[in-house]
Image: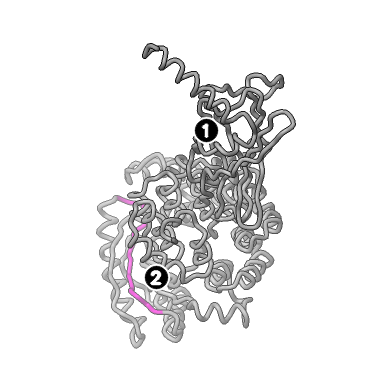
Amino acid sequence: MTMKKSIKLLAVALLGLAAAACASPEKMADMANNVTVKCDPAVLEVVAGEINATVTVTYPKGYFHPKAILEVTPVLVYEGGEAKMAPFTYQGEKVKDNYTVVSSDQTTVTEKVHFTYVPGMEKSYLELRGVAMIKTKSATLPSRKVADGANTTYMLVGDAAKAGSVAFKADNYQPYIKQTAEGQILYKINSSTVNRSELKSQSVSDFLKSIDNINANERETIKSTEVVAYASPDGGEKLNAKLSDKRSATASKAWDKVTKGKEIAAPEVKSIGQDWEGFQKLVSESNIEDKDLILRVLSMYSDPAVRESEIKNMSEVYTDLKGSVLPELRRARFIANVEYKNYTDDELVKMVDDNSDVLDEEALLHTASLVKSNAQKAAIYKKAIDKFNSDRAQFNLGVVYLKEHKTAEAEKAFAKVAAKDENLENALGVIAMRKGDSKVASMHFANAGKAGESNQGILDILNGNYDKAAKELAAEGGHNAVIAYILTNQLDKASAAATCKCPKMSYLKAIIAARQGNAEGVKTNLAEATKMPFFKERAAKDIEFAKYNK
């Protein structure tokens, strides 16, 4: 017998043995380990509440009997149960049916597997269960584990029904309020002499009473004083400048006389010259028939001489000005610059319970920011709404409801907000996101511009758009930015952004360390994170730490 013929006979014999090896369902079960199975990804991941993977199965030559039917069922086994897909069914070349044909030669088939996440699947594994049938005989194949699962790191961004945040609108409460107390003396035309009657005028008398009241009020302090002299804007600019200077000198002496014995600092003395600013103010507040024409001249010309000439050309108007406006500008002002110390934070918190009626809108809004409980905040905002029809309080009431996860109440509160601005668009986007309407949420976040960017980033994480989320959250930083960087495998950026010292950030740092293969980093950060029971329970099941939990 020739060598060539011997090899040919050996090959035929081997093929016969292979065919004989799987000539029954039992033998297909016995030789199931010869089948190669791969899963991509090898570690399952939950994305937007779904688990998707690709399973590739290679049947070796001679394994699949031409008359066999094989049912393969993907099963996700997890704590508390298991989830089964409809089986994939394959048939040999001689089976007359409509299943996927697998030849007796080496054949590779690829299938998509899909499961909807339920709690418990974070600790799970994917296996394939098979049943082989040839005619009336059948055999169960050994279950084949193909992947571990399932990674739920994206869920650290928060529950979709509670996700998203909206900032309170700020108050304009001022701890210190700048005020002034004023009086003035008037001069006759072209004169710098202070008439004795001016020292006893009602204006000066009221100013001195204000000084006494300020000094008696522990909340008020005079920070500085001024004497400011002027000339009315009729006559030459140089002449009026000199006249204003002389008035500043005589007004300073008048200050010394009227404030003698008062607890008040010496003033800073100023000379302004022509009082065009005061002129414009008095004209705008007057009943002069052609005042709009005068104001137009002031806006058109900046040169004092041109202004004066144009106004004097309006003879009737100028007559009115000489009688009612110009005499009021031949003056010197006595000014006390006062600082009022507003209620302290402690006083406000006490007053909101005992005497809230004396608080204005800004004080109520500020007090709401000081109290801790949402119930207290809501009560204060309702007071501001009732008393001042405060639109910011109305908005902030909606924010309180969002923090309490009372989506329906928040939606009603925001519906009453009058200011249709970026902040409201952002709030409406959060409402839509919590109601599961991603399309409407994204529309509102887009309208909100920068105000909605971070919430859009959260929405994109929840929907599996990790690259987009990482860009949107980059400027904000914080937990969600770190999560986005982890999910896009930008671990250096994730580490740089992980600056907060808190259990959640420690947990995220542990995940970063695990992905970098840094066992000591995992240990150190988990030790901090697991001081909080939630993270201790999660870490025990988290696939991120599978090789460190053994």
Q: Residue at x 56, y 52 (%)?
A: 124
Crowd tier of the residue under label 1, counting other residues whose Cα lies within 10 Å: few below 14, some 14–19, many 20 or above: some
Relative to 6, does residue 306 appear above or below in the rendering? Answer: below
For label 2, the residue is 185
Report if residue 109 lies within the magenta region.
no
Q: Residue at x 36, y 14 (%)?
A: 3
Give the color scheme: rainbow, by chain, secondary structure or one colour: one colour
For label 1, the residue is 56
Can you tell which quarter of the image residue 188 is in? bottom left
On-image quarter of the C terminus? bottom left
Between marks 2 and 1 in the image, the one whose residue lies nearer the viewer: 1
- The type of residue carrying mark 1 is Thr
Which label was assigned to residue 297? none
Q: Give the magenta range.
A: 221-236
Viewer-nearest residue: 368 or 10: 10
Left/right of residue 381 with respect to residue 261 in the rendered view: right
Left/right of residue 236 with respect to residue 86 in the rendered view: left
